[in-house]
Image (cartoon, coloured by chain):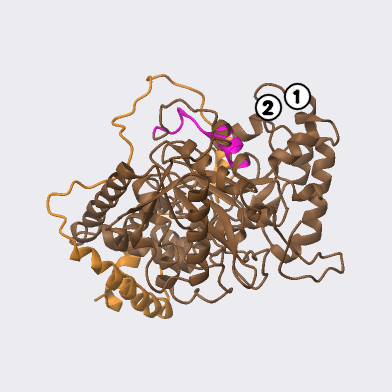
Amino acid sequence: MIESKDVMKIADLSRLTLTGEEVRLYSSQLNGILQYVEKLKELETGGTEPTSHVLDLRNVTREDRATASLPVEDVLRNAPDPKDGFYRVPRILE
Amino acid sequence: MELFELGIEGIKALLDKKEVTPHEVLDAFFARINAVEGKVSAYVTQTREKAYEMAASAEKAGNSGIKTLSGIPFAIKDNLCTKGIKTTCSSKMLENFIAPYESTVTERLSGAGGVFLGKTNLDEFAMGSSTENSAFFTTKNPWDLQRIPGGSSGGSAAAVAAGECAAALGSDTGGSIRQPAALCGVVGLKPTYGRVSRYGLVAFASSLDQIGPITKTVRDAAMVLNAIAGRDPMDSTSAPLPVPDFTKAAGMDVKGLRVGIPREYFIEGMDPEVEKAVKGAVAQLEAMGAIPVEVSLPHTGYAVAAYYILATSEASSNLARYDGVKYGFRAAGKDLLDTYMQTRAQGFGPEVKRRIMLGTYALSAGYYEAYYGRAQQVRTLIKRDFEEAFRVADIIATPTSPTAAFKIGEKSADPLQMYLSDIFTISINLAGLPGISIPCGFTGTGLPIGLQLIGRHFDEEMLIRAAYAYEQSTEWHKRRPALPSDNGADKGEGPKAL
């Protein structure tokens, strides 16, 4: 059972600020979904290999050769606050 | 028949005979968009200028050699990067994002001569089954404007059904190509995981996402798959396998083909009209020489639960990149951490936040084994179910969606009910198999019903073979919605035969 404080903890880990209203809504919705997901525990899975993806591919590598990258100005065009070829962010240290 | 009602094959025939020019084809489609887009709302962005430029260069290059789709107008789901054109994912987070590079699929499509009319609406970041989660607007089902078109590729499916493009690209993580195709009465093909490069597809759940065509006919889907499939050095999960000419499978008969009917998919409580239409389709295949066999997929009942753990876990990781620093929306915060928190709180809609939190929870210390670990094991069991079934069957036939299109707002308050509408499509993503949805009938009120065919890994040819044989023995794919035009007096409702 997820409580409001759990939802706030998860929101914090997810880097999301929630309103009080959202905390209430998500508590109830996440509980509903998690209750449904509980059915996975009915299954005997001991010793079953997990599947992370379905392809029979391992350690795909390419030749270690430098190729052209995207032009910096094209990439920075979408940045909220670019400056001198860098991303600018609010101050971290006082 | 009007030009806008034609699919790829029909338009190509007219272009080849020089009865129309690519420019005239575009005129016809943009006239159609002008007439009905106000009602359907399929497009987030229309790219008229670019489309005419592309048509002009297609005309110049001619239609020889690899230019198999020369002058064909496409709609592109707005989670595929198109260089210099907005790629929004129907999210406030990317509302003004202009992709600095081109996705491999759109590169290949335009390389084959395809022309892009615009970018289509989706549930935000492809999370949803109705387009109601779009941050901008809900797309309407062309067969009944009070209803949802399905999702997440609802804009693409509605655009194809409404004649607002000849064909479209969608993406499918848990049914997002097949379900809207079924609900809009068109063809939707999700290729095998690894068949098509995902480079330039904005990631939702990387082990499940796959790009594919939404078209008016099965042969059209094969033609698009020919253009977009194959190994791409930019996506290391694209399979290093040869790509056959998929159109050759369209036209082969189905004599002796074993069609698996999974008993777990025909359960009590199923919509009787859907059941009747799908069973009718199986009977039709049998009449053409196919052999129905009962198969069992015993872990079907666990697929939705496993999917919503795995997909949200991958999403919580993939969407961590939206931090208000590198690109996209930024909200002002009092320090860097607060900027992250406010940016994500204001930039993401409710369903995206819900999934990020569910995934974060499933991956968090103390819960990882119980949720993510177990869901990965269940994924193995589901994959094995299909391996067993494919020992006795060559393809598997199921409904695509448990119901026809539902009303706008009907399920939006209850996320779990919405998730359960994907029950027949998500196992296929978990197992990485190819699946196709094709029209197989209509409800009494004139809403389309879809038949889903599932194949073995990298055996899209079998899907196309069976789907084409069925399609050609029916008239369903020839029906078009009677859309009231914005500039006409036609108030007709319900389906009309051509």
The colour assigned to chain A within the rendered structure: orange
Graded by Cα atoms within 10 Å as few (under 14), some (14 to 19) or many (20 or more), the crowding at tag 1 reads few
Q: Do the residues labelled 2 and 1 touch (CB within 8 Å)?
A: yes
Q: Where is residue B255 in the image (x, y as percent from the top left)?
A: 48, 40
Graded by Cα atoms within 10 Å as few (under 14), some (14 to 19) or many (20 or more), the crowding at tag 2 reads some
Chain coloured brown in the rendered structure:
B
Vertical arrangement, residue B346 with respect to residue B382, above or below: below
Which one is in front, B402 or A67? B402
| Mark number displayed over residue A14 | none
Indicate yes or no whether the magenta region holds residue B193.
no
Amino acid under label 2? Lys
Q: Is mark 2 on a helix, strand or loop?
A: loop
Q: Position of residue B259 (x, y in %)?
A: 41, 48
The stretch in magenta equals B220-236
Mark 2 lies on residue: B67
Indicate yes or no whether the magenta region holds residue B231.
yes
Mark 2 vs mark 1: in front = 2
In terms of sequence position, does the residue under pointer 2 or pointer 1 come before the other? 1
- Quote the CA–CA distance across marks 2 and 1: 8 Å
Which one is in front, B239 or B369? B239
Vertical arrangement, residue B415 with respect to residue B218, above or below: below
Residue at 35 percent of width and 78 percent of height: A28
Which one is in front, A63 or B384? B384
Amino acid under label 1? Ala
Mark 1 lies on residue: B61
* Quarter placement of the C terminus of chain B: bottom right
Tag 1 subunit: B
Q: Can residue A53 be seen in this view?
A: no
Residue at 41 percent of width and 27 percent of height: B240
Residue at 78 percent of width and 43 percent of height: B49
Q: Position of residue A69 (x, y in %)?
A: 51, 28
